[in-house]
Image (cartoon, rainbow, N blue to C red):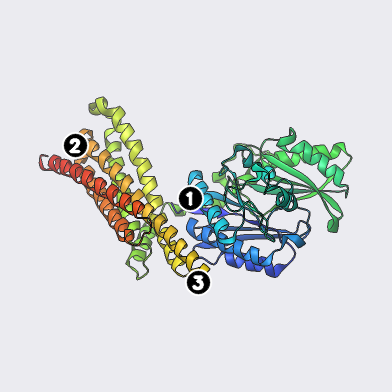
Amino acid sequence: MKRIVECVPNFSEGRRREVVDALAAALTLQPGAVLLDREMDPAHNRCVLTVAGEPEAVARGVIEAVGKAVELIDLREHRGEHPRMGAADVIPFVPISGITMLECVELSVRVAQQIAELYSIPVFLYEQSARIPARQDLAYVRKGEFEGIREEIRTNPERKPDFGPCEVHPSAGATAVGARFPLIAYNVYLNTPDVKVARAIAKAVRHSSGGLRYVKALGFEIKERNQAQVSMNLTNFEGTPVFRAFDLVCREAARYGVSVGSSEIVGLVPHNALTACAEYYLRLENFSSRQVLENRLSEGLSQDGLSSSEEFVAKVASPDPVPGGGSVAALAGGLGAALGEMVAGLTEGKKKFESVEGRVTKLHADLTRAREELCRLVEEDAASYKAVIDATKLPKETGAQKLAREEAIEQATRHATETPLRTARVASGVLFSLEEMARIGNPNALSDAAAGAQLAYAALKAAQYNVLINLAGFKDRAFAEACRRECDELAQRAAERLRHIDQLMMGA
């Protein structure tokens, strides 16, 4: 599965189109990152940009965009309806496919640290990335906004940022970075300009005041529309669906003799959130998402894996260095694990193997997890190598630029080393599982287990080579030597396991 992360940075600029254009361009500067949506709100004086793609490409684009925000946005002159504390106000990373929430947290922490170091901006970790429980709530982090934080950050220990100085940037303020589940920004417009009504409704709706779980809400006056607005963030649309939030706003509005004029979604929305609304309001019976034409079409097309495998092999054969040996190593390991799964499937449920059924089932589960992880590593290895290439292209005219470039190369190379090291670890586990599967599994599939073991060993050795090639240039010699030792130990143990499997085959 392709690794895709989404990022939805909010910048404190919603009136100057040329500035938003520059921010969007910076976000998509890296190959592999695509701008999906852009929303400008002049009343809030805020823009919401949605970018998605390979994790490393998205991360680098976000860092570039923050630099552009520092250059072009001055919070000392900023006015708008929406709470804000930074030029780049909030930067959430969202797992979409092939990437876990934990990996998104790790990515957000790395990006937060680099933003702080490159631009001298205090950065607070929030949502799933928060190291302080109270900071899971963005409202807590942003309390007092730019002006209040500017006064408190130097003296109040609770305002100490996770990264960066205890001093807000003079013009760019502070930034919140984190990882979260998909969020829906949802606004409901009331047929009244009375902001007090909107605030009362928002209080009734939001969870912190006793309202709906997973709902954050504020009331605003939108002067250019002569309407009040209930602005909501739905942080878990499955726990609290869009239709439930809308219904409650309507009921609360009726209490004040006010009707709802319209509603809007800011940015992108998950398909299932709208499907749930259709099912609820249309009162559909026995509805399934598989009845949606596009879903079935996508499902049918994804079953034809031949073209994708041919495409991958063609990419490896091309002069482009990505995907390279690290990705191929991970793919080989994934194929080895898959063969082990097949052997397990040919063993489970058969009476003659009842005595080992429990152990085979456990091995089957281990091999499945390993295969899924190795498939993710195919994409991650390619992305990590691209990040190294991107780092070498950073400017180096000034002393500060040279230092930043060297640090970026070091960090990118470290990640490009850790990725094949993870491949080697997982491939080692596959080989151990296959050795046991070869001993206790269906003997008619012994050659498949042995073939899988050869692939797992090849994956481990290829990954080892990809680790070793990076070690010479590291400043951190302790890290380099630790990687070398671990690879050596993994390879030695794997070679022994492979000999055992060879002996089983020779005696077959």
Q: Residues within 10 Å of mark 3 (few under 14, many from 20)?
A: few
Q: Residue at x 65, y 47 (%)?
A: 184
Q: Amino acid at mark 1?
A: Glu
Q: Which residue is mark 3?
A: 395
Q: Earlier in the sequence, mark 3 or mark 2?
A: 3
Residue most extreme to the left: 507
Q: Which residue is mark 2?
A: 443
On the rendered structure, is 164 left or right of 489?
right
Q: Earlier in the sequence, mark 1 or mark 3?
A: 1
On the rendered structure, is 68 left or right of 432?
right
The picture places residue 156, in percent across and down from the top left corner, at: 68, 43
Q: Earlier in the sequence, mark 1 or mark 2?
A: 1
Q: Residues within 10 Å of mark 1 (few under 14, many from 20)?
A: few
Q: Residues within 10 Å of mark 2 (few under 14, many from 20)?
A: some
On the rendered structure, is 283 left or right of 132?
right
Q: Amino acid at mark 2?
A: Pro
Q: Residue at x 78, y 54 (%)?
A: 81
Name the residue nearer the viewer: 369 or 282.
369
Q: Amino acid at mark 3?
A: Pro
Q: Residue at x 61, y 61 (%)?
A: 66
The picture places residue 430, in percent across and down from the top left corner, at: 29, 43
114, above or below 202, in the image: below
Q: Residue at x 57, y 56 (%)?
A: 116
Q: SS for tag 2?
A: helix
Q: SS for tag 1?
A: helix
The picture places residue 470, in percent across and down from the top left corner, at: 33, 60
Q: SS for tag 3?
A: loop
Q: Is residue 138 visible?
A: yes
Q: CA distance from mark 3 to mark 2?
A: 60 Å
Q: Is residue 281 visible?
A: no
Q: Which residue is mark 1?
A: 299
